[in-house]
Every structure is written in structure tokens, then in C-alpha cells.
Amino acid sequence: MPALMIQGAGSNVGKSLLVAGLCRAARRRGLSVAPFKPQNMSNNAAVTGDGGEIGRAQALQALACGLEPHTDMNPVLLKPESDTGAQVVVQGKVLTTTRARDYARLKPQLLGRVLESFHRLQAAHDLVIVEGAGSPAEVNLRSGDIANMGFACAAGVPVVLAGDIDRGGVIAQMVGTQAVLDPSDNAQIAGFVINKFRGDVSLFEDGYALIAQRTGWPGFGVLPFFADANRLPAEDALDLPRRSRGEGFRVACLALSRIANFDDLDPLAQEPGVDLTLVAPGEPIPGDADLVILPGSKSTRGDLAFLRAQGWDVDLAAHVRRGGHVLGICGGYQMLGHAIRDPDGLEGAAGDTPGLGLLDVETEMRADKRLTRVTAVHAATGVPMQGYEIHIGRTDGPARARPFAHVDGQPEGAVSPDGRIMGSYLHGLFADDAFRAAFLRGLGVEAGPVRYGAVVEQTLDALADHMETHLDVAGLLALAR
């Protein structure tokens, strides 16, 4: 079955959105289309219906296709745990934890699993739209590559190269990429697009023509910056809001060094009565914050040390003394307890790390990873809600007698006696409109008329419309073979 791959002339050129928009455009043409990313690196994962995990961007792309997320859509997921090491998830399940240099030796062994997943999607759909990772211009990584040209050549998939004009130097990005690629890799490139243009597109006509002339590649258009991209779930923490609007109920989320599954924040960011800001390293927690969120983390013990290095433990203590609320989600929940015990050294050296002591619980890290979608009931309001769990570690203690929620009749999470400190393993709750409204109402905030799922669907349609207007979408889809 036909397939087409979008690769980038650099990182963060907008490949994920381009694939999502093409997926929605193809679906509206009546095609059965599926997304695919051979290798992703992200700590923002989605739990799939088949009990695994994939990158959040592929879950959004699946939504654009009208499909349930499946582990075949992202067969290799790297989840960084340190600057030099990552957990390797293959077809939804943890394979190993490895250092970057060792992963280079592991990659060739994974190509078979990648192609296996790709061919299953091909067999089930009319079209597969593939997203590359980083850039094929990183030719030092070409040996054993499974993310860009290594995959494209092995699978025989044509490539469209995307450049980001917003960061400048796009002509050099495109021409330079062709210059460093081997002839066999260049032969896979069937065209190019320019993304994130701001201003008068006619001013770039000469530059666009120059790229086509120097490379010999056909161009498929210049895409203006899509302003509503912030209404879609972010995969990269750099895309989260970092500055306050200065009005409304103030929610401050700590930008941990290994922040994970921060899509919890996206629905809150769209609430008109909520002022959400990400507290960057080195910045204090705002003294007028009403709610502080400790988000998920891929390395709870490491991020707890990082939190203390920023002085946020002191700020949190002051916030609590002032009567503020705190919500810890997953790794953030673990940090709120008295201790995190890691007898097997799953997050580094074996040992115990003192917690923040804001909830009367303790956590023990265990090798078995919990990956599941859940239906829960919020204990404080009785409102049913949908979410998911994705974590290692089990948390227990006296505070569990005051649960945050109930799952299958069993207590989940913990709440302090005064109700101001809350912890839960449940991600994705704020995407549930009824729960989000009830939770905010409990904090004295009336939720707006936001229907988060509908907003995401409408934005995907708007993205496809935007691409149909400015790109030769029919021409791009016709490249697929």
C-alpha cells in the first residue's frame, strides 16, 4: 500500500503537525490512513488500547485519522532518563535502558521490528504517512539509522523534506541537507515544503525558486505559521506556555528536567478563567499562585533533586503556609510523600530519597510498569472521569485513607486532611470536561464552555484546511507509492 514520509531539515520544523494535517486531509478524501513514526524520543507518551505506549504526537495523528492509537504507530520510543541514557520501548513494551553510545549498537537489531509494525499498518490501510525524527542531515548517525533515511530506503518510501523558515537560514537548511546526503539517500527525496512562514509569502518567491533550482526537487508550497497549533496537545515541553497572562485563577506548573506526560496541562491552558504558566528552572514559584502542579517525571528521584536545586521546595512550603493548593500527578505525587525507596536502583543508584513530606505516604519503585486506561470516580465530587496510568512504583501510607479517586471501587491517590495537598497517579483527567469543571469549581473557579475534545477535532480540521489552502496537498498525496 502507498506511503509517504515527512522528514525535517532540522529538529522541531513542524513534522508532527504536517503529518497530522495530511492524515486529516487524506481521511476527508475517504482514505483509510494511519500515522507511523519509526523512532520517537519523548517522555510525553500515550497509553494505547493494546496495553502499550507510544509518543503523544502519534496519538494525536491517530485521532486525525479517526483511529485508536496502536503500538505499531510508533514501534520504537526512547524516553530520556538522563542526559546520556534513555529507556527503550519497543512495540509498546520496555526493552531495556541504555546509554546513547550503546543504543547506536542496538539500533540495527530494531529495524526488523520497525518494518514489521510498518507492514502491518500498510496491510490494514490505504495509506501510511510517516514522520521522521530529527533530521537526515545528521549524517554522523546514518549508520544503522531507523528513524530517517535508513527506514525510508529499507521500506522504499518517498520523502518530502520540510524546512522551518521561522528560525532563519531555510535555504541553507534545504540545500545543505542535499549536499551532505549520499546519492542513494538523495534519491528518496521527492520534494520539499517550507513551514512556519510569517508575513508576505511573495517575499520568499526568489528563495523558494532558488531551493528548487539548486536541489532539483519540486516544491509543494510555503505554509504560513498555524497560529492555532497551541490548541493541540503539545509533545515537547518547550511548546508549553511559559508566561502568565496576569489574570484569572493562577496555576503554576514546575518545569522539571524530565517532565513527562504534561498533556495534562493542555486542557487547563484553554480554560478562560485559568492563568497557566510553566515555572522555568531558576525562576521562583509565583507568590500569588493559587495551585501548584508537580507534573509527571521520567526520573522521579532525579527530578526531586532538581526541584530542590531550584529552591522550589522552599517556595512550595511557603505556598502551603499561605493556604495554597498543590496537585502532584504521577511522579509529582511520589515526590509529595515522605520518601521514595529504590532498593533495586531502577532510577540510578539504589537507595532512598527523602520526599517533600507534604503527604503522609511513601513510594517504593518496582520494575513492573503499570500501563492502563482507567475509568475513575473523583472522591471529592463523585464525578466519573476517564484517564490513564503510566508509571513504575507503588505508593502507600495513612493519607491513602483519604483518596483522590476510586478506581474499580479501590482507593487511588491521596489527599491531605485539609484537602489542599492532592496526589494521584491518574493522567489525562483534565481532558474530561465534567471532571475539569468539578475540580475547578472545588477551587472556586467556574469552568468556561470549553469542550476539549471538540476543540482538538475542530483544530485538526482547521489545520487540514490551512494546508489545503497553501500547499499542494493533492500533489503530496500523489507522491505516495
Image: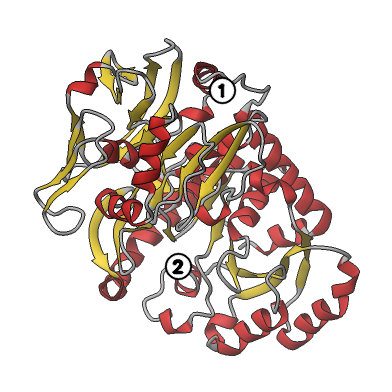
- How many dots with numbers? 2
Secondary structure of residue under mark 1: helix
Number of other residues with Cα within 10 Å of mark 2, as a class: few under 14, some 14 to 19, many 20 or more? many
Cα separation, mark 2 vs mark 1, equals: 36 Å
Instruction: Indicate how the structure is coloured in the image.
Output: secondary structure
Determine the image quadrant of residue 450.
Answer: top right
Residue 51 shows up from this direction: no
Residue at the left extreme of this rendering: 343
183 sits to left or right of 328: right
Dot 2 amino acid type: Ala
Determine the image quadrant of residue 296.
Answer: top left
x, y percentage for residue 399? 23, 22
Residue 346 shows up from this direction: yes
Between discs 2 and 1, the one toward the N terminus:
2
| Residue located at (63% from left, 60% from top) | 14
Nearest the viewer among 479 and 110 is 110
x, y percentage for residue 42? 43, 55
Point out the frontmost of discs 2 and 1: 1
Number of other residues with Cα within 10 Å of mark 1, as a class: few under 14, some 14 to 19, many 20 or more? many
Q: Which mark is residue 147?
A: 2
| Residue located at (49% from left, 80% from top) | 138
Nearest the viewer among 139 and 297 is 297
Dot 1 amino acid type: Asp
Read off the residue under disc 1: 433
